Amino acid sequence: MSRLPIVAIVGRRNVGKSTLFNAIIRQKKAIVDAVPGLTRDILSYNVEYKSIVFTLADSPGLDLPDSSELSGPIMANAREYLKKASVIIFLMENPAPSSFDLDLADIVRKLSLPVIAAINKMDGKELLANMENFYAMGFREMLPVSAKKHFNIPALMDTVLELLPVKKTAKHEADLKIAIVGRPNSGKSTLLNSLIGYSRAVVSEIPGTTRDSIDEDFIYHKKRITMIDTAGIRKKSRITDDIGYYSLTRTIEAITRSDVVVHLIDAVTGLTETDKKISDEIMEAHKPVIIAVNKWDLVEKDHRTFDAFIDRLKFKFYRAEDFPIISISAKNRLRLHRIIDTALDLRERASIKIETPRLNRVISRLQAAGRIPQLQSSIRIYYATQTDTTPPRFKLFVNKPEHFRKDIIRYFEKSLQKELNLEGIPVKIIIEGKKRKK
């Protein structure tokens, strides 16, 4: 299945690329801040306009100083991605082109792609006279815009459609959306790059390289998979700036819109308190989880090493026993197929509707098992029904709802997971008192 055509926004730092990106997709997906050079990865989003679908890409500012530790990888990643583009939106800003804009114009022309020169920050009609300052650059398509005020965005989009060499009208929804989460530098971007087969995200030993959530699609056994690479989650007490806050917000949004979450744990470092906090965010969203123990190639091991690691993991974090645990090496592409196979299985089982008679037979058997003494005497479940899927939600009608403590609810969660083939899938139980007839 062919990819959608790519429309890439390029320009120098702080010219308004991310603001324009957000204005076109009508979401605040890219982080916008006055700090130059905020965007590091290529951020993309599938856009449908007048029934035509394309991928819009927000690129880093291409005037990063050479002194920046990440400038080399960021620029190499951006230039490689631009080669895949079908149309370039070359963004400059009022009142006149800078010296770097002139240099960048030469770079853009060498790509031999259709180019739209968009002049941003035209926030008032009186500023349109400044367009004369840009005409000498010689671009055939040149438009004044205001990303902040959404001025001339429809005209920009119409021009994009005119220049697209291939116009696709079918928008393919993903069969599975997987969010990759973990601590900074646990290998999330490396995992994304290894799964899709090329360097989509910037990979660096510097923690916190990824700031936005990055989506990328690929086909696996005729299934369309969307991978979402997220910013590394730190302890909230360590988030001291707006950028860190928005990165955390984007990560939580990515978890919410995913079908399955892959929680990446560093095999060398092991489980940390931050990992437990990350798991809390995943649990809050009630998403199926795969614990992927990354960098397994760096661990000295024998036939008992992985079992011992799992035992330690469950000892430190009891909820780990609820989820499938897979050892991988993102760098060496070790056992990555198991992540996708397991995620597909979790997605399918999480969407199953349990027949009410079967559910109530299971509940009756659990009540009669004698594991909870109160179920034989003071408390009782009259009836159960499934109210939702993905995640499965069950409502239990009981006689004394106030007596159903957390440990009793936990018992039914674990038991239903086992009895109904829902291992690895969060189960939500709602307790409701049975209304008495007057």
Image (cartoon, rainbow, N blue to C red):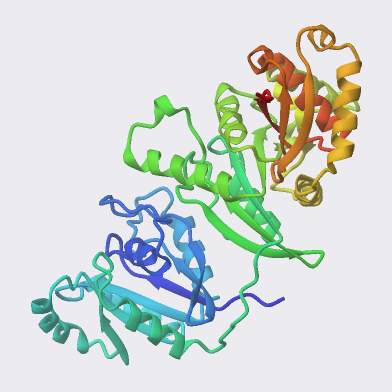
Residue 339 or residue 207, whichever sits in front: 339
Q: Residue at x 38, y 39 (%)?
A: 245
Residue plotted at (53% across, 82% down): 52
Give the left or right position of residue 412, taking residue 265 as reference: right
Image position of 137 with respect to 73: above or below: below
Q: Nearer the viewer, residue 393 or 13?
A: 393
Q: Is residue 277 above or below residue 371?
A: below
Q: Quadrant of residue 436?
A: top right
Q: Please say whether residue 199 is visible from this viewpoint.
A: no
Residue 360 versus residue 341 in the image, above or below: above
Q: Nearer the viewer, residue 190 or 56?
A: 56
Q: Indicate the quadrant containing the C terminus: top left, top right, bottom left or bottom right.
A: top right
| 329 displayed left or right of 31 | right
x and y percent of residue 109 in the render? 39, 84
Quadrant (top left/top right/bottom left/bottom right) for the N terminus: bottom right
Instruction: List the single residue furthest toward the front.
Output: 438
User: What residue is shown at x 53% (from left), y 89% (from top)?
Assistant: 165
The mark total stands at 0
Q: Quadrant of residue 92?
A: bottom left
Whether residue 122 is visible, yes or no, is yes
x, y (%) of residue 118? 29, 78
Position above or below: 164 against 403: below
Residue at point 59% right, 82% down? 169
Q: Position of residue 150 (x, y in %)?
A: 28, 70
Q: Position of residue 351 (x, y in %)?
A: 76, 49
Residue occupying the far left of the picture: 126
